Amino acid sequence: MFLFAAKLIVGSRALMMNSKLETDPHILAGKVKALALSVGFDLVGIAPAGPSKYREFLRDWLDSKKHGDMKFLEARFDERVDVGTLLPGAKSVVCVAVNYNVASFDGPEVNDLGKVAKYARGPDYHTWLKPRLYDIGDFLRASVPGSATKCGVDTVPVLERELAARAGIGYVGKNTCVIHPEVGSWIFLGEVITTIELPTDTPMLDRCGTCTRCLDACPTQALSPYAIDASKCISYLTIETDSPVDPAFSKQSGQWLFGCDICQDVCPHNRRALVSDDPRVAAKMGEGFSLDDVLSWDEKTYHDATRHMPLRRVKLQQWKASAQRAKDNYG
């Protein structure tokens, strides 16, 4: 596993142009990692493409309706728990991560702040992560003719956190996030599944220890050690469902408008996490919006405020519902 602090100064296009038949898997793995760093990923590791060890856990989790209204998680179950079903003949998964822990946006102070999760304050990460994953996939196929690849961010049915942990990107913490000891959990994940068998990296040891800060801090008690009831999570309540929010959770959602960072904010690893200066993840807004402003949005102001950002995932009506709930909780 490579860390971005030791990035290699190698042009991605040069690597792509110089790709050639490579029979030594260790040399190819080194080239793939160098390419991943050169195109802008901060962490890279390689995982074996075996079936998930969480198949039965996921089946029980879905049967218990802990995914709430997220019906898409029920679909393509066999692919989700085995990348070899998603890409027949898969042998390895190149896993990457980008640090999105950026400096605070220098904007006007908002008195009636409705909070937005940190990952959503910048440009839509899908638009710039995918092309760089495709670069890695193109390189692999050019290096080993006849091989196949499948790329994904968080729109492909794979258990990306398990794969990232297998690849040594970090370990899955009690808050269910992938945590790197130096970068923390403020990371976007991506994968390139390949039919090429590459040497794999060593998974990290769990460093949560006896810490329970994330579990204790969760307002809706959505977390238990290494598991989450998504139907109770504030991120789910403000993003993934347009159903009426259970009054038991409405007050607990506080001033959150879009997502929630509480379980990450309290993590000791994130208190000393490295800060990224990557312009691709730079914040385009402050910590949130004025609640009164959101409640007054029309379609044009909504589109202007959320253009080219993950925020566009939530429709205007849901934004207003979350804003009203946060306003009721304000003070």
Image (cartoon, rainbow, N blue to C red):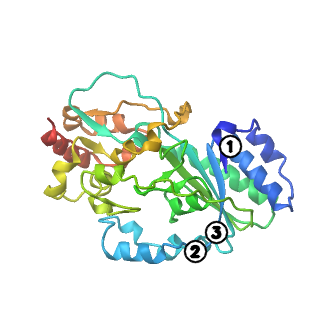
Disc nearer the start of the sequence (3/1)? 1
Image position, residue 82 (x, y; %): 56, 73
Residue 230 picture location, percent across and down: 32, 61
Q: Which image quadrant: the C terminus?
A: top left
Instruction: Give the residue pinned by disc 2.
Output: 51
Q: Nearer the viewer, residue 227 or 29?
A: 227
Q: Of the residues under marks 2 and 1, which one precedes in the sequence?
A: 1
User: Up-down: is 152 above or below 102?
Assistant: below
Judge by depth and name the residue closer to the eye, 297 or 255: 255
Which residue is located at x 46 percent, y 29 percent?
103
Q: Residues within 10 Å of mark 1 (few under 14, many from 20)?
A: many
Residue on which disc 3 sits: 49
Give the vertical position of 295 relative to 246 (above or below): above
What residue would you read off at disc 1? 37
How many other residues sit within 10 Å of disc 2, few (<14), some (14-19) or many (≥20)?
some
Q: Secondary structure at mark 2?
A: loop
Instruction: Determine the CA span between mark 3 and mark 1.
Output: 21 Å
